[in-house]
Image (spheres, grey):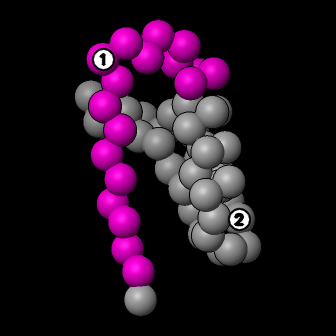
Amino acid sequence: MYLSVMLDLFNNEVVSYHLNPHPSLGQVLQTVQQAVQHRPNVEGLLIHSDQWGP
């Protein structure tokens, strides 16, 4: 299983997450969409991605 997580680094809160059997762009986009629904004011939002690979 692959986990995509959006964290609020100000208070270490998990804003959204999504599990998928395979890594995919769709998984990441669903996580971001959930985060925007949870926090609709995205002005000044900064997203950092830790990318990994084989």
Q: Secondary structure at mark 1?
A: loop
Residue 54 included in the magenta stretch of the image? no
Q: Secondary structure at mark 2?
A: strand
Three-letter amino acid code of the residue under disc 2? Asn
Q: Residue at x 51, y 34 (%)?
A: 15
Q: Residue at x 63, y 33 (%)?
A: 33
Q: In the image, is 2 to the left or to the right of 9? A: right
Residue 47 included in the magenta stretch of the image? yes
Range of residues picked out in magenta: 36-53
Q: Residue at x 30, y 17 (%)?
A: 44
Three-letter amino acid code of the residue under disc 1? Gly
Residue 1, x across and y down, in percent: 66, 74
Q: Which residue is mark 2?
A: 20
Image quadrant in which the C terminus is located: bottom left
Main SS type for the magenta part?
A: loop
**Residue 51 figure quarter:** bottom left
On residue 14, which mark appears?
Answer: none
Callout 1: 10 Å neighbours few (<14), some, many (20+)? Answer: few
Q: Which residue is mark 1?
A: 44
Residue 38, x across and y down, in percent: 59, 22
**Residue 13 at least partly seen:** yes
Disc 2 or disc 1, which is closer to the eye?
1
Q: Is residue 42 above or below residue 2?
A: above
Furthest-front residue in view? 25
Residue 47, x across and y down, in percent: 35, 38
Residue 26, x across and y down, in percent: 68, 54
